[in-house]
Structure formats: C-alpha cells, structure tokens
Image (spheres, rainbow, N blue to C red):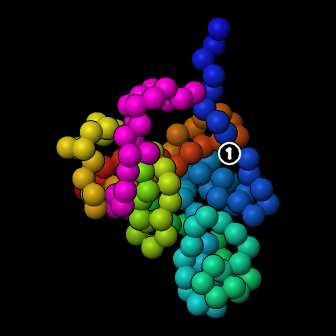
Amino acid sequence: MAEPARARPKPTPETQHFWDGTRAGELRLQRCDACATAYFPPRPFCPACGSREVSVFKASGKATLYSYVIHHRPVPGFTPPYAIAVVELEEGPRMMTNIVDCPPTPEALELDMKLEVVFEKLDDATTLPLFRPAKD
C-alpha cells in the first residue's frame, strides 16, 4: 500500500498569484499601494489600513528564523524529525514553513539565522516554498 501523500493547498482567487509564483520559482507577496505595508498571507485588502489598492511583487526570498518546533511524530508526507518554523521575511511579514537542508536539532536551528527560500515541486499543480540556511 502506498504511503499517504502530504496535504496539498487549495488555491483560491485571492491566493492564486502566490501559487503561480511558487510554480515559477518566485515568492510573491502583496504590498498596499496606500500605506506601503507588505503582508502575508494573501488577501484582497491591506491588513494595516484596509485599502483594497494592493499590488503583487516578487520578494527577495531572504528570511531569518523567528521560531520553530521539531516535530517527532509521523505525519503523512513527512519523515520525522522535521522542523516546522515561522520565518520573518526580509520584507517584514512572517510565514509558516519547513526548514530543509539543515539537521532538525536545537544546535543547528539558531534563532535569527539567515535563511533563503527553496521550492519543492510536489506535482504539476503544487510547488511549496521552504527555507534552508542561506549560502552567503
């Protein structure tokens, strides 16, 4: 019997630009045209001022490790242990993700460590943004 697959996100009209970006190898965020706040997750209005005048832009893909937990229990699509993290993007917003290419240990996962985005293609419809220690 095949192992159950990792859960897949379900894009909506409000998030489609984000998932199109990940398939293209880009981390896309939104910025308010009225107050210049960059934000995540995607939504059709600014969470800071409520304006509906927002633009999509390509983010740098750079981040720092804000918080994490090392998960040790089996979950479909994951091999424990693995790191579930909140990263702070260079542009300001925070997002939940997984840390890859790094041992899932407290010794290796240092808060504020520099990270960079990498993309994992799950299938033709879904590519996930993950983060690894920065190489520079």
Question: Which of the two residues, 1 or 52, is positioned nearer the viewer here?
Answer: 1
| Residue farthest to the right, as pictured | 13
Residue underneath mark 1: 9
Residue 108 among magenta residues: no
Q: Residue at x 41, y 37 (%)?
A: 71
The reply to whether the magenta stretch includes residue 67 is yes
Residue for point 41% across, 65% down: 88
Q: Residues within 10 Å of mark 1 (few under 14, many from 20)?
A: few
Which quarter of the figure has residue 75? Answer: top right
Q: Quadrant of the N terminus?
A: top right
- Residue 89 in percent (x, y) is at 43, 65
Residue 86 in view:
yes
39 or 24, which lies in front? 39
Judge left or right: residue 4 versus residue 26. Answer: right
129 relative position to 65: left or right? right
Where residue 66 sits, quadrant-wise, is bottom left
Q: Residue at x 27, y 47 (%)?
A: 109
Kind of residue at disc 1: Pro
Counting from the top left corner in percent of width and height, residue 43 is at: 70, 69
**Bounds of the magenta segment:** 63-84
Residue 93: horizontal and vertical position, in percent? 49, 70
Q: Is residue 59 above or below residue 32?
A: above
- Residue 131: x and y in percent read 41, 49
Let me know if residue 131 appears in the view. no
Compared to 37, does 58 lie above or below?
above
Q: Secondary structure at mark 1?
A: loop
Judged from this view, the residue extending furthest toward the top is 1
